[in-house]
Image (tube, rainbow, N blue to C red):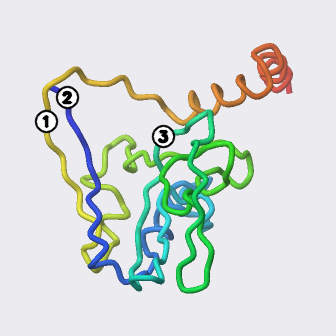
Amino acid sequence: MKKVKVIKIDVDKCNGCRACEAICSAFHAEPKYSSTNPERSRIRVLWDPLRDIYVPVLAGEYTEAECNGRDIYTIDGKVYDECSFCRASCPSRDLFKDPDSGLPLKCDMCEEEPPLPEPLCVQWCLSDALTYEEREEEGEEEEKTDEMEIGLESLVKKHGAKAVNDTLARLAKE
């Protein structure tokens, strides 16, 4: 059995306060809680003007390639592309990329040691638009890839293993 952790989103309850963005960015600041920068947040609240609702979107997996779809939507005179409500971090957009390093961001459910009872965005959501669910499903437990490994893989793909190794060796000497 593997443990599955899910943040459920009820857009009908979201009031667009963006408290989830603020606490997520503060949690991921260096040092923790030292600043709030929504660009570091692993959750973004988007506004859908057609239905006048707010849509919280969690950062998903990094994809190396752009998707094939390039549909354009015009809603109340504002133009949106297909990427507007996508969770992935990819080469074609900067929505879920760290503003300083450019590395992809992914929701990590605020996992740390000791573990939190539930992600901070859920704890800070006063309208209960975000709820946390943990359940067990058939299958093997996945090996967790941490942020450093994701970042290093991205750097190796962009600059090559030798350049990354040389830079790490130089930094280790400093």
Q: Position of residue 118 (x, y in %)?
A: 27, 55
Label 3: which secondary element: loop
Image quadrant holding the C terminus, namely: top right
100 lies above or below 65:
below
Could you say which disc has been placed on residue 2 in the image?
Answer: 2
- Which is closer to the viewer, label 3 or label 2? 3
Foreground of the two, 129 or 52? 52
Q: Which residue is mark 3?
A: 61
The amino acid beneath tag 1 is Glu
Could you say which disc has been placed on residue 5 in the image?
Answer: none
Foreground of the two, 80 or 25? 80
Question: Between marks 3 and 1, how big is the CA–CA gap?
Answer: 21 Å
Classify 10 Å Cα crowding around label 3: few (below 14), some (14-19), many (20 and above).
some
24 lies above or below 97:
below
Q: Residue at x 81, y 18 (%)?
A: 169
Label 1: which secondary element: strand
Q: Residue at x 20, y 34 (%)?
A: 3
Question: Between marks 1 and 2, how big is the CA–CA gap?
Answer: 5 Å
The amino acid beneath tag 2 is Lys
Q: Earlier in the sequence, mark 3 or mark 2?
A: 2
Image quadrant holding the N terminus, namely: top left
Label 2: which secondary element: strand
Label 3 close to label 1 by CB (< 8 Å): no
Q: Earlier in the sequence, mark 3 or mark 1?
A: 3
27 lies above or below 61:
below
Q: Which residue is mark 1?
A: 136
Q: Is residue 80 left or right of residue 86?
A: right
The amino acid beneath tag 3 is Glu
Q: Residue furthest top?
A: 162
Label 1 close to label 2 by CB (< 8 Å): yes
Q: Position of residue 77 (x, y in %)?
A: 60, 85
